[in-house]
Image (cartoon, rainbow, N blue to C red):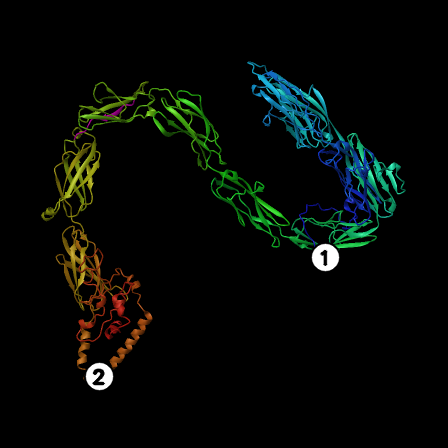
Amino acid sequence: MQLKIMMPKKKHLSASRAPLILFLCQMISALEVPLDLVQPPTITQQSPKDYIIDPRENIVIQCEAKGKPPPSFSWTRNGTHFDIDKDPLVTMKSGSGTLTVNIMSEGKAETYEGVYQCTARNERGAAISNNIVIRPSRSPLWTKEKLERITLRNGQSLVLPCRPPVGLPPPIIFWMDNSFQRLPQSERVSQGLNGDLYFSNVLPEDTREDYICYARFNHTQTIQQKQPISVKVISAKSHRERPPTFLTPEGNASRKEELRGNVLSLECIAEGLPTPIIYWIKEDGTLPINRTFYRNFKKTLQIVQVTEADSGNYQCIAKNALGAIHHIISVTVKAAPYWIIAPQNLVLSPGEDGTLTCRANGNPKPRISWLLNGVPIEIAPDDPSRKIDGDTIIFSNVQERSSAVYQCNASNEYGYLLANAFVNVLAEPPRILTSADTLYQVIANRPALLDCAFFGSPLPTIEWFKGAKGSALREDIYVLHENGTLEIPVAQKDSTGTYTCVARNKLGMAKNDIHLEIKDPTRIIKQPEYAVVQRGSTVSFECIVKHDHTLIPTVMWLKDHRELPSDGRFTVDKDHLVVADVNDDDGGTYTCVANTTLDNVSASAVLRVVDVPNPPFDLELTDQLDRSVQLSWTPGDDNNSPISKFIIEYEDAMHEPGLWHHQTEVPGAQTTAQLKLSPYVNYSFRVMAVNSLGRSLPSEASEQYLTKAAEPDKNPTAVEGLGSEPDNLVITWKPLNGFESNGPGLQYKVSWRQKDGDDEWTSMVVADVSKYIVSGTPTFVPYLIKVQALNDAGFAPEPAVVLGHSGEDLPMVAPGNVHVNVVNSTLAEVHWDPVPLKSIRGHLQGYRIYYWKAQSSSTRNRRHIEKKILTFQGSKTHGMLPGLEPFSHYTLNVRVVNGKGEGPASPDRVFNTPEGVPSAPSSLKIVNPTLDSLTLEWEPPSHPNGVLTEYTLKYQPINSTHELGPLVDLKIPANKTRWTLKNLNFSTRYKFYFYAQTAAGSGNQITEEAITTVDEGKMAMASRQVDIATQGWFIGLMCAVALLILILLIVCFIRRNKGGKYPVKEKEDAHADPEIQPMKEDDGTFGEYSDAEDHKPLKKGSRTPSDRTVKKEDSDDSLVDYGEGVNGQFNEDGSFIGQYSGKKEKEPAEGNESSEAPSPVNAMNSFV
């Protein structure tokens, strides 16, 4: 099976609805006679009509033909038989009519110039070639001539003639100098179509010794050179301008004739001063848009593929400032003969009819003549089946003897056309020429063209079928072409299958199977995307291709439709193209092309490489004035990101060399700036361009520009008058910088006088400093001050007057009538009378209160009295003292403050703060717990804030479910620091709330929890019963009790092993105070927490810690230490204690769980 890949062109569907049985017209384009059948000769290859040969090489004149039997060949030369056997230099190729003339060994090409014609002949007829005109190429030398120097004045016109020798073919002309460099051409200087060099006007720079015209003969690859022409242009002081005149063509009108299909070239070259400009128009018409081109600076108008419609008048206009002229060129387009209908080979079966048509056109109209087997038909043997009707030969009822080759010749004065067409009379059954079982693969939704080349005589009819039992395919879906090809305009997946082509004529039938497969199209499902990257970075393009699974695609990348550069920076993997270290040359269009054997798809993306702009250049200063200058520059490359603005900076080389300052900014479209300048500055400027990526490097600095000196434009700023001593006035200011000085000799005129006096201004001119001290002034007197700048050119404008004061001194008077109003136990309000303004002797800063708390004699000996200070700004006469301690004795005084310091203190005033509520007791501890009592010890509040009147103790029990019992309220005298609570429940947890009171109220409370001990009496009773265990009845009772205890122990073990730890933490969180104290080894107190130190004071709200920490070696403490002879250990991990364990980690007592059994007493207690 033969595989054919199809990428067909789209065809139009036929409109007919008839059955798709196409009786093809008798056009040989639809038929090719197989070479195994008898047929007249057909010329397949021949040399061109006008055959220019290289005289240095052998002459080869081609003539190839096919036919059955194979044709024989003969030649004519200049109309007579050319006997090649008599010329030893001429040989004919075997099986061919091609001639070779061996002139390289001997002989001359000129000997074989002439008109040659080849004839190919067999028993069925004779075909002839065109008349082949053989001419050797010629490249003659220039004739020797002596050329004089051409001398002319500046502005005159000039024509340098070339006049190349006549060659074959004509040479290509160009002008160069002795160094083989082409001479520059322009609107002023250009080469004409005849090869001459035209100067519209000459300039001094046109002077040279080597104007050389060269003629290049391409056929022989030789270049001939004319003698150099010397031109000297004399500079004239004045040259008169003149309107245009034409150098070529001459006159006002000319004519031009051109053949159809050639290039029409019209030329107008004018001289004048200034240089004229050329314009072209077509009278009564427009120039064809797509075929019109301007050459040689619009001096030449070219129209390609010229037609008869291009005939007409063309007008060229030469214009300069002094006038215009025009020239009309009348164009006539002639035409050598060209085919309208060329005769085609005709295959007929005996008895059929047919026609040969030969129709041509031209200007003038060509003459049609017929030949038969190379002989004019008028003298050829008659054939009753043939009738000539002008350009048509009509055949009727042909027979085998009618076979022949007919030649049609169409000629006029500009050329001729010669066509061979045979009439071949055959009787042949149909045959299919396309290979059998050919497989076509087509992409879905594209046309499918299934070939069925056929032959037969008479001409067969063609039918197409799909599948083994399919009916003939109809025209409403398919298109059947004349050559037998079946077209499926839009192939779909269901178009896949086997198609059968059937050819029939009266002599028989032939068929052929064609197989069609439809493939999924190749698609790019992820296309590369437009990218903008900065120079030096990395960019990646993605291209993911989906394709038919039976096709293997190849993916390649192109840059600007060419192969990628062979550069290691370009990396291609399966789906990506990566470009590293991107540079400017990498910008462009990147295309991903996916190819299969059936189709190809592509997708493109543009890469734009951007960067900060290149620096501007060519800075130029113009319009230089005293206070302004114009700066212009040329922008650097914007590197594909538009310039948004330019930043201009300046350097003052006189005052601050090397330091650049910001001058101004201008928009990115602007390349000039008018800059304001200051006097007496040696300016240099530089420019930076800014785009979206940042700013460029600075440009090179401009030339320096020194502005003239002038008086200062401004005076010093920040002028102040403040005395540093009571008898002086210090005048300070911020001096002008060198840029602001406007000239040399910068000084300052300092002036002052008292504000309230009648004194005249006192002035002093000082050097370029920033301070002047006036001595001997009264204390704190207001002065009017001004500081004026001056230089060698004059004074600055009149300065502003500033108010200042001479030096301050300490205030002389203390505030009077100081009294205190106590607001509450921590706040007091102080009032005082203001001091007289004159006594302040300076700027009033405010009043300052010193206050302190009286100390006891013992405290006073220990530390220095701490005084506190509060300052009240301005002229306030009262203030609040916050943060006082209640029930305290305070002393205060008040002082006035100015810029120099404090005045004398007012007499001390004493006041007392009332009582306040006390702080919480410093500590609370529970000691000596017993079966029914707990002893509380505490320390008084650290800040009683008054006289303690009593303590309040509140407590309440906590049961095993963590519920709080009734609250008991107890008052305790203030002089107590220890209290014992009695008649409490044994083995019960209590929570205590304890606080102190003064006459002002209750203070903050402290809380604690503690547990009474277990019932020691019951344990002692159990011990005494052992001593009376000699009675029989008691022994039985004890056995029963022992059995019951054993059962209880087993139940206890089961409950413990199943339940694990009790959820004590969650129950503790339900209490107001979850902290529980650990059991101490010496007093049996229950708890979980311990403190590292005994009797350590607790923080506010904490509970009293146990006296000692529970230690691991003491964790097996037994009830023997607290009872009377009970032999058993108390397990500290009992249920009661476990319910108040707040720690997550194991306590030391828990380490004994697995090795020691719980005592009976402990097991009983777990059910209390």
Q: Is residue 966 above or below residue 409?
A: below
- Residue at the bottom extreme? 1032
Q: State the SS at label 1.
A: loop
Q: Which mark lies nearer to you, 1 or 2?
A: 1
Position of the N terminus, as image quadrant, is bottom right
Q: Is residue 628 left or right of residue 467?
A: left
| Mark earlier in primary sequence (1, 2) | 1
Q: Label 1: which residue?
A: 467
Per the picture, the main secondary structure of the magenta-coloured stretch is loop
Return the residue nearer the eye: 290 or 284: 290
Q: Is residue 1156 above or below residue 42?
A: below
Q: State the SS at label 2.
A: helix
Does the residue at mark 1 contact the one at mark 2 (Cβ under 8 Å)?
no
Name the amino acid type tagged 1. Answer: Gly
Q: Is residue 115 visible?
A: yes
Can you give x and y, in whole percent of width and height, for residue 383 in the image?
A: 89, 42
Give me the disc on residue 1035: 2
Give me the disc on residue 72: none
Can you give x and y, in whole percent of width and height, for residue 995 in the image?
A: 19, 56
Can you give x and y, in whole percent of width and height, for residue 1158 in the image?
A: 26, 73
Q: Is residue 164 left or right of residue 1086?
A: right
Return the residue nearer the eye: 566 or 991: 566
Range covered by the magenta-colored residues = 799-809
Residue 1067 covered by magenta stretch? no
Return the residue nearer the eye: 581 or 1161: 581
Quarter-wise, where is residue 77 in the image? top right
How packed is label 1: few (under 14 Cα within 10 Å), some, or many (20 or more)? few
Name the amino acid type tagged 2. Answer: Ile
Q: Compute the Cα span from label 1 to label 2.
A: 117 Å
Q: Is residue 798 visible?
A: no
Can you give x and y, in whole percent of width and height, for residue 108 in the image?
A: 75, 32
How packed is label 2: few (under 14 Cα within 10 Å), some, or many (20 or more)? some
